[in-house]
Image: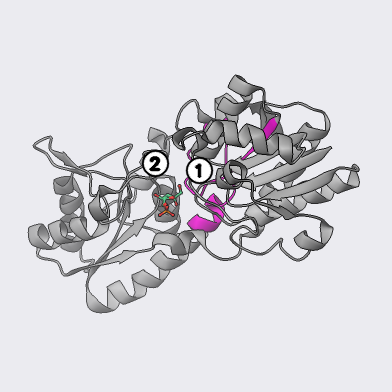
């Protein structure tokens, strides 16, 4: 078989480990691999690259993706779907492996359901918000980076008696905020799923300061809407409220807005750190390398068995396969019990 592989959406550490595993298992089984450049853009425009054992040598610990990635949505490009189908035929691809999050896998699921495209999926995202899998790779690395940042901010916060607001990623969900906040000992954590109010957050900080602690760490998820006791909610979005081809608004800035609110309401000197894309860069943690590798092998096996329309997923400790549409049916949000673990240490 000729198997094409693409990586789409925001990159994350571990993508190269998946590519390596698919290539190694695929070539071991006598298949030929084809690299598709820049996610669905490569199939829409017909941009391919060679992909053999030589190309994947040494990439296991490397961040990013050797195939490149974009947020191109063929369903939003004029004639995009027809172009994708045409290029699959021209390149004589018998199967596709699509590595991505809700958007990339959503396109894969539709192409499979509507046009019978022989595709299998691999779930990735630092946000960890895909249903159908307990964890996605990239998440552990992002949490590790955020936790290290919180640890570092503690010492400078303590020296200066400051409140440090740390804005972390997580477009729709607060997984990174909750996990890094628990691990780093945050004093308040604000996430989209359990939006405590700005007033409550300030009360927790005041309580802490009254009990003799003159510094605090506040972790806020970029998707948290500033929420007030009056019931007002305000989403702070990035420049010009730009949206990508999947209709997502560019987030960023809530940390700054929250820091200003805290300083005005409590009088405590407050600084903000926006971790941004640092959370997506660099080498994957061992845990992410292993998970990505297991997902890659599973995807190659699914292709070999011609079980298309399926996706690799982690259930407990086992890598299983589920229907592609299960991955994108709903967002996996942070359950209340996880937030309660974090909340036990507020104030
Ligand atoms: O989906 C992963 C993610 O990192 C989100 O956490 C974040 O909102 C978004 O991608 C940022 O996208 P971009 O890299 O296009 O700025």
Placement of 262 over or under 93, stated as above or below:
below
Q: Where is residue 342 in the image (x, y as percent from the top left)?
A: 37, 47
Of the numbered discs 1 and 2, the one sitting upstream in the chain is 1
Residue 173 disc label: 2
Identify the residue at horizontal 61%, vertical 60% (top origin).
Answer: 284
Q: Are the residues flagged by discs 1 and 2 in contact, CB closer than 8 Å?
A: yes
Any magenta on residue 99? no
Magenta stretch: dominant secondary structure? loop
Q: Position of residue 71 (x, y in %)?
A: 48, 46
**Which of the two residues, 103 or 203, is positioned nearer the viewer here?**
103
Total of numbered circles in the picture?
Answer: 2
Judge the density around disc 2: few (<14), some (14-19), many (≥20) Cα neighbours within 10 Å: many
In this rendering, does residue 318 appear at all?
no
Q: What span is colored magenta in the figure?
A: 119-143
**Which of the two residues, 216 or 345, is positioned nearer the viewer here?**
216
Quarter location, residue 67: bottom right
């Amino acid at each position: 078989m000729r198997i094409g592989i693409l990586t789409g959406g925001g990159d994350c550490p571990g993508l190269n480990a998946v590519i390596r595993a698919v290539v190694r298992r695929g070539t071991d089984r006598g298949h030929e691999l084809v690299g598709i450049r820049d996610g669905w853009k490569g199939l829409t425009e017909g941009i391919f690259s060679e992909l053999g054992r030589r190309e994947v040598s040494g990439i296991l610990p490397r961040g990013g993706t050797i195939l490149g990635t974009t947020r191109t949505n063929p369903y939003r490009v004029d004639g995009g779907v027809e172009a994708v189908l045409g290029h699959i035929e021209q390149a004589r691809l018998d199967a596709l492996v699509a590595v991505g999050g809700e958007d990339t896998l959503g396109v894969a699921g539709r192409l499979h359901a509507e046009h019978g495209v022989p595709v299998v999926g691999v779930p990735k995202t630092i946000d960890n918000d895909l249903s159908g899998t307990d964890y996605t790779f990239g998440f552990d690395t992002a949490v590790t980076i955020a936790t290290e940042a919180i640890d570092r901010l503690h010492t400078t916060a303590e020296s200066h008696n400051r409140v440090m607001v740390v804005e972390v990623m997580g477009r729709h969900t607060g997984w990174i905020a909750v996990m890094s906040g628990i691990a780093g000992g945050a004093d308040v954590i604000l996430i989209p799923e359990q939006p405590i109010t700005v007033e409550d957050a300030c009360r927790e900080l005041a309580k802490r300061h009254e009990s003799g602690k003159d510094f605090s760490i506040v972790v806020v998820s970029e998707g948290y809407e500033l929420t007030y006791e009056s019931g007002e909610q305000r989403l702070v979005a990035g420049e010009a409220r730009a949206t990508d081809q999947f209709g997502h608004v560019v987030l960023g800035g809530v940390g700054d807005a929250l820091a200003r609110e805290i300083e005005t309401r409590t009088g405590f000197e407050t600084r903000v750190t926006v971790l941004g894309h640092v959370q997506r860069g660099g080498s994957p943690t061992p845990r992410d390398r292993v998970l990505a590798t297991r997902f890659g092998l599973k995807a190659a096996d699914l292709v070999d068995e011609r079980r298309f329309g399926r996706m690799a997923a982690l259930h407990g400790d086992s890598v299983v396969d589920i229907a592609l549409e299960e991955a994108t049916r709903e967002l996996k949000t942070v359950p209340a019990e996880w937030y309660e673990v974090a909340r036990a240490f507020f104030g």
